[in-house]
Image: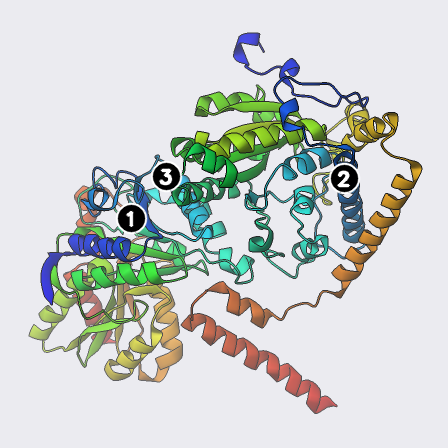
Amino acid sequence: MTTTMTLAKAITSGLDKILESDDKSLLMGEDIGRLGGVYRVTDGLITKHGAHRVIDSPLGEAGIVGTAVGMALRGFSPIVEIQFDGFVFPAFNQITTQLAKMHARSEGRLTAPVVIRIPYGGGIGSIEHHSESPEALFAHTAGLRIITPSNAHDAYWMIQQAAACQDPVIFFEPKRRYWLKGEVDTETPALDAFKAQVVRPGTDATIVAYGPLVPIALATADAALEDGRSIEVIDLRSISPIDFDTITESVQKTGRLIVTHEAPTFGGIGGEIAARITERAFLSLEAPVLRVGGFHMPYPISKVESQYLPDIDKLLEALDRSFAY
Amino acid sequence: MTRAATEATESDLIQILTPDGQRHSHETYDAYLGDVDDQMLRGFYRDMAMTRRFDQEATALQRQGQLALWVPLRGQEAAQIGSGRATRPNDYIFPTYREHGVALTRDVSFSEMLRLFRGISGGGWDPRENNFHMYTMVLAAQMPHAAGYAMAMNMEQHGWDEERRAAEGNAVVAYFGDGSSTEGETHESMVFANSFNAPVVYFCQNNQYAISVPFEVQSKVPLVNRAIGYGMPGVRVDGNDVLAVLAVTRWALEHARSGKGPVLIEAVTYRLGAHTTADDPTKYRMSEEEKQWAPKDPLIRLETYLRENNLVDEAFFEQLSTDADAMAAKVREDAMAFPVPPLAKSFEQVYAEAHPLIQEELAWHLEYEAGFADAAEGEQ
């Protein structure tokens, strides 16, 4: 059965399913109960499941993640919300030194199946600390898994897959796509949450994108087609681990790769993909792997953010460079 | 400091056993010592003496290059044995990295504890066996875990009446020190625990120093005064008095267990030795101060009490000394015999579920290492 819903509502429905099916699951975060979250992603869930399972927490990110770790140690499966990307840093210690390492430090005796939901990314005209993409900072930490959906169907299923995972998962939600509508098939599960997906086949070059930039990559492929270029678009979906097999296979076919993300290019996920694909598919590459990302600066003031963010033109320009090589 | 600025004062310190071994009655806390008979008193002394002997052996092992680090607790035995003995097996303990005495009360193997310090384990023991969590090296990071763990206990005990909670309910003890009292996570933990009425006993061993920095740099007023700001009861207890610590912790656990929310205990004690084996206390504190604290030693005062009341004879101390030496020898033998796990084992422990990058890197690592084995074989 398919239903049309926004990406935000797909997450709401996914969370609802989790709360229905697992009595050890619970939600916690700032303003997620009565208000339903600042983006209303948890709207209505407190009424249905009660305040003991949809918990309005005190205002403290280290406390939110830290208490979630404690709950997980007691056998619960907390799904916590960090209100905005730029506010995750007070919890950075808990995430990197505690949550990520619990399984390793305990020699595999303890698991910490905590899900951390974080709305991320720019393009919403907001003030500082509300538009960031900190995924690379977490990807560098072993023990964490990081996934991000780009469409409603994936959002519905991937949040449930995150909840079912015994490892801690950071679930990055592309906030500027919250209102993007899509068909959700609530009976046929999405593919493995930690696999990439070819969302548009092509033969001449590959664009890897994730989260908010997948629609832009698809639009770029449309535009490139007018120049007679057939672009394959891969939705990465999982940032840690990265499904290098799917990307390698694509590049062996197309010979060209562009990786794009909103996060700064320097030290970003694109660099990791470029290095790995160079190792795996060196002889297939017709040009160096190119990256289209943010500049090495704090996320800019919103009036000029359009010049900072990757867009169709920047991706087309990168394709031109690749084909001109 | 004006009187108005503080709540607790020296005279508020709960004390049952004075430094010169005199036992006083206390109108509130005697009720929590009703079952303490002569045998239990001897047992507390034995616990403290065994802990001190273990601490001494581990310090020696570190000095001999057999441990990467050791965190001595000498002087804090009463705070740890008294509080640890107040817990029930189903209570869950979040220690710092110095709670070797509490570990003893939870039947955690001393030998197992050295695996962490010998550099062959990231944790050491199984926290689920004795409800005694792994040591946490990042100061105060365990504090929100304690609040969350207790919140989860509350959910399990949802709908229980006070009587049932008192009888069957569980609680958490969160250990921390005067240094980690400053960390933000201590604050957030206390806010969460109070807001959700979570059964946490916050047990601070104020041993007067965070490595080299004296307590007055962490707080200008007794730490227990913070309790009122969070809306929980706070008790300041003589941390070198095993009976006072036992009584106060029993009261606090009863309070928390019965659904009345968290409690803060400040156990005033003194770290007689160094912060860790990498430390040199002569650089930051006067020997005069150490001399002042030496006679307040928790073992001395209980020994005085036991001797003056004829509860022990020389044979007791001789036997204890023999047992402690045997334990130390066993711990040493065990520590030296622990096998070093291969790095390959570490790959398996990063994630609970299969992970392609781990598999890829493990395969590379094994192949690389196997190359050395092949080369060695070729040379032979």
Residue A192 in the image, given as x and y percentages of width and height: 29, 70
Tell whether B3 sits left or right of B271.
left
Q: How crowded is mark 1: few (under 14 residues within 10 Å), some or many (20 or more)?
A: many
Label 3 resides on the chain identified as B
Question: Given the image, what chain letter belongs to the residue carrying mark 2?
Answer: B
Secondary structure state at the residue bearing disc 1: loop
Q: Which residue appears at 18% of the width and 56% of the height?
A: A10
Residue B88, image x and y in percent? 59, 42
Between circles 2 and 1, the one closer to the viewer is: 2
| Residue at the disc numbered 2 | B43
B205 to the left or right of B301: left
- Residue type marked 1: Glu
Instruction: Give how far across and how far down residue B102 sits, in percent.
Output: 66, 42
Residue B186 seen by the camera? no
Q: Distance between the residues labelled 1 and 3?
A: 43 Å
Q: What residue is rendered at 28% in x and 46% in y?
A: A299
Q: Which of B371 and A106 is in front in this view?
A: A106
Q: Which chain carries label 1?
A: A
Q: Mark 3 points at which residue?
A: B159
Q: In which quarter of the image is residue B116?
A: bottom right
Identified by mark 3, the residue type is Gly
Residue at (70%, 50%) from the top-left corner? Answer: B69
User: What numbered label is drawn on residue A132?
Assistant: 1
